[in-house]
Image (cartoon, rainbow, N blue to C red):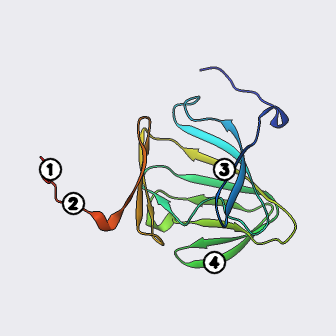
Amino acid sequence: MEILKIKMEDVPAKHKNEHEGYEYYKRELVPRGHAQQCVAALYEIPPGKSAYPYHYHTKNEEIFYIIKGIGSLKTPTGNQEVSAGDFLFFPANEKGAHKLTNISDTESLIYLDFDTHNDIDVSFYPDSGKIGVWGKNINQLYNISTQTEYYDGE
């Protein structure tokens, strides 16, 4: 590994807009695979949108630093308003469940997202009953209601 020095304007923004209510622009500052234990990205969420559904991780911890804008942060203890200068830490357990939504009508919500990175992570989506398995060779979502027995299919 080498020291990584980049200029924000040199990192292309990847746009994702695949589902109603969810949209973002993401600049991967420390992309997966570059570092062994962390990733970092700059997110821009358009007005009225969220980047991701309500979820929590079992291995990866997350930190958000709000740079610009105003948002609503959904957590297990309820919703709270966040704005520029707020620092948010999400532990890797159900107490770290979160969903960040831009509540401005006109201004983007911009934040720095810094995460730990494990070879395998499992995410739970309490609102939709899904489980995600993320890692080097797997990125898949499953519906928890289709649970099976341990030896099924063996």
The answer for how far apart the CA atoms under marks 1 and 4 are is 43 Å
Q: Which residue is mark 4?
A: 79
Q: Is residue 40 above or below residue 91?
A: above
Splitting the image into 4 quarters, where does residue 50 fall? bottom right
Q: Determine whether the residue tagged by mark 3 lies in a helix, strand or loop.
A: strand
Q: Is 89 on the left or on the right of 110, as rendered?
A: left
> Which marked residue is nearer to the observer: mark 2 or mark 3?
2
The answer for how far apart the CA atoms under marks 3 and 4 are is 19 Å
* Outermost residue to the right: 106
Q: Which residue is mark 2?
A: 148
Evaluate if marks 2 and 3 touch, with contact meaning CB atoms under 8 Å apart.
no
Residue 153 is labelled as: 1
Density class for disc 1 (Cα within 10 Å; few <14, some 14-19, many ≥20) is few
Q: Determine whether the residue tagged by mark 1 lies in a helix, strand or loop.
A: loop
Q: Nearer the viewer, residue 77 or 32?
A: 32
**Between disc 1 and disc 3, whose residue precedes?**
3
Q: Which residue is mark 3?
A: 113
Q: Is residue 105 above or below residue 16?
A: below
Locate residue 96, reporting x and y percent.
Answer: 51, 64
Q: Is 129 on the left or on the right of 108, as rendered?
A: left
Q: Amino acid type of disc 1?
A: Gly
**Between disc 1 and disc 4, whose residue precedes?**
4
**Between disc 3 and disc 4, whose residue precedes?**
4
Locate residue 140, reporting x and y percent.
Answer: 42, 49
Q: Determine whether the residue tagged by mark 2 lies in a helix, strand or loop.
A: loop
Density class for disc 2 (Cα within 10 Å; few <14, some 14-19, many ≥20) is few
**Between disc 2 and disc 1, whose residue precedes?**
2
> Which marked residue is nearer to the observer: mark 1 or mark 4?
1
Q: Amino acid type of disc 4?
A: Asn
